[in-house]
Amino acid sequence: MSRGLRVAGTREEADFVVLNTCTVTASADYDVRQAIRRVHRENPEARILVTGCYAQRAPQEVATLPGVEWVVGNSHKHHIIDLLSATEAYHGRVMVGDIFAQKSLPLFPILDAGADRARPNLKIQDGCHNRCAFCVIPFVRGGNRYTPADEVVNQVRGLATRYREVVLTGINLGRWGRAPGSEMRFPDLLRRLLGETPVDRLRISSVEPMDLSDDLLGVIAGAARIAQHVHAPLQSGSDAVLRMMHRKYRPRHYADRIQKARTLMPDAAIGADVMTGFPGETDALFEESRQFIDAMPLTYLHVFTYSERPGTKAVDLPGAVPVEVRRERNRILRELGDAKSRAFRARLGGRSFSAVTLEQPRTALTTNFLHVHLGYDVQPNKLIEVVV
């Protein structure tokens, strides 16, 4: 309980409903609108607060949806508790400001990861200085900023008393520490967390390929308390498409980093984000990308279909790919990802790995990102050894 507020048992019982939104694709926007309408239909008396990236990008659009009382952009998220516990003076207010004016990232305490989560996500970095042609994220998240090391260490130290695994997250996590006057980098932070906290396992969410330095890969590979798991967005395996996307690496750079990770960690999970149907992606360029992905020692893929986002450079590029072609290419890469995942899992059969038990009954997640089904009941949030 905080300021007289408590978590409602169900959505239908709530006086306030807070929706944290995404806007990375048009379908994400659609899902948010549907969710708002569903909440309002199920609980017409609930006062709805919408925050996050969709709220930051299109506040007036969100404000017109039924039941929405407050729209709070990422620029004002820290005011949410004040809004919910304040007087009627805040009624109907839209709070959205210049996200690029944000220069710091306060670390809000995780009081409870919730009954349905055994692995809290600790956001220690936000924003992005890259300007990829397809991406709206910098415009709704602002520039690179991060939580100071001492605050991160203190938070992880506290979480380690309650959780076996803590996931470090950020929009551009590998850029942690990159600021004028800062001498620390992300690998240095990991060393401090290993040396100054009792956390059983740290898992690193996603790191851009140009930030997968030898130092970072060496820290991950050399520490049993860091999950053997690397996720590096690729987007395309075609040199020409990467140039059109304004990505800062080429396939040869990506291959070098992924091969280095595989050499250091033969049994690690290595995943990638890939996109299909970017403007100008011809059949030949897609096939070039598919062949590159097939050759990489990846163990899973997150496949996205290109979606036009207002304000991005890609919207004005020639060579739009028909939606049905985008979806067919998506299907092809999903099948490729499934095949890589099956081959990886089959190769590990009979091997023993450390795993954290999850909220789903008889389920655990191994250090190398395998969801395994257990033959016995076990409480969530336990660290165990499993034979795959």
Image (spheres, rainbow, N blue to C red):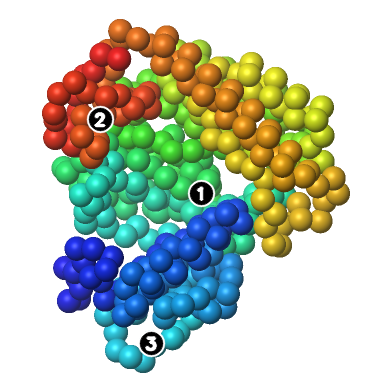
Q: Is 237 left, or right, of 201 in this rendering? A: right
Say which residue label 2 marks: 363
Q: How many C-alpha atoms fall within 10 Å of the one at disc 1: few (<14), some, or many (≥20)?
A: many
Write down the residue under mark 1.
171
> In the shown orientation, is residue 96 left or right of residue 329?
left
Horizontal and vertical percent for residue 75?
Answer: 49, 69
Going from N to C along the chain, the mark reached first, 1 or 3, is 3
Relative to residue 248, is residue 369 depicted above or below?
above
Q: Residues within 10 Å of mark 3 (few under 14, many from 20)?
A: some
Residue located beneath label 3 in the image: 90
Residues tagged 1 and 3 counted as in contact (Cβ below 8 A): no
Say which amino acid is labelled 2: Thr
User: Circle 2 — which element?
Assistant: strand
Left/right of residue 261 with respect to residue 284 in the rendered view: left
x and y percentages locating residue 194 in the rendered image:
29, 33
Residue 282 coordinates in the image, percent (x, y)? 82, 34
Name the amino acid type tagged 1: Ile
Q: Secondary structure at mark 1?
A: loop
Residue 160 appearing in the image = no
Judge whether 125 appears above or below 285 on screen.
below
Near mark 2 (Cα within 10 A), the count class, few <14, some 14-19 or many ≥20, is many
The answer to which of 46 and 58 lies nearer the viewer is 46
